[in-house]
Amino acid sequence: CDSAYQYVKKNSIDAFGHVKMVQPPATTLTGNKLHYDGNTKRAKVVGNVVLVDKKMTLKTDLLNYETDKGIGYYTTGAHIVDGENTLTSTKGSYNTKSDFFTFKDSVKLVNKDYTIDCDTLNYASNTKIAYFHGPTNIRSESGNLFAFDGEYNTITGESTFSKDAAID
């Protein structure tokens, strides 16, 4: 960072400007400001936040990150790029240890071949499988699909749908 205050008795740090936190083996978190509490192992990063983990990049304005668990949470919207898939949502979390995302509220997954809009989506970055819950629309050149539950393999294109599934 450009500057920092360390509070030894409180076991915390406030960092400012070009903040960069690296957590081996492959996680880097950057932003404008950081508050880290060493007792709870939690960091709050604000402003131009970018979390890079393996081949995934998450961008948001505010991220709470549990360093001991490797989990980041956001509630102000985020944009995630993972290979050919781009995901956006209002709220969500990412577990760097299991490569697992949870997205809620205005979720959109865009790929060159399809677009998924839903309320809740879980996405396993390591397997590239999306699990959706609630009203879900999947649009592609070959047609549209609507369902309330299911999973979609973004690599093979294979899907399993349940609960009022309909294809147009």
Image (spheres, rainbow, N blue to C red):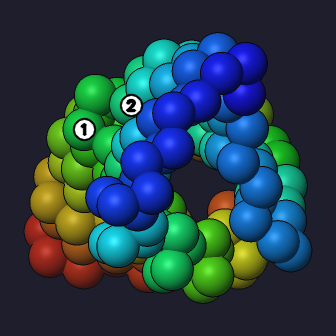
What x and y, as percent, mark residue 39? 35, 73
* Quadrant of the rendering where the N terminus is positioned: top right
**Residue 10 placement: quadrant:** bottom left
Q: Is residue 3 above or below residue 150?
A: above
Q: Secondary structure at mark 2?
A: strand
Q: Is residue 148 above or below residue 4?
A: below
Q: Is residue 29 above or below residue 99?
A: above
**Residue 141 placement: quadrant:** top right
* Quadrant of the rendering where the C terminus is positioned: top left
Task: Give the Cα separation between the discs numbered 1 and 2.
Answer: 8 Å
What x and y, as percent, mark residue 14? 46, 35
Residue at the spot x=41%, y=40% of the render? 35
Camera-nearest label, 1 or 2? 2
Residue occupied by mark 1: 75
Residue occupied by mark 2: 62
Q: How many marks?
A: 2
Q: Secondary structure at mark 1?
A: loop
Q: Is residue 161 left or right of residue 2?
A: left
136 or 27, which lies in front? 27
Q: Which labelled disc corresponds to residue 146? A: none
Q: Is residue 30 left or right of residue 55?
A: left
Q: Amino acid at mark 2?
A: Leu
Residue at the spot x=50%, y=25% of the render? 33
What x and y, as percent, mark residue 95? 52, 72
Judge whether residue 155 can be spotted in this image.
no
Q: Is residue 168 left or right of residue 104?
A: right
Residue at the spot x=82%, y=48% of the render? 83
Query: N-terminal of the two: label 1 or label 2?
Result: 2
Residue at the spot x=15%, y=60% of the render? 134
Q: Tell me whether circle 1 and circle 2 mark residues in contact (CB < 8 Å).
A: yes
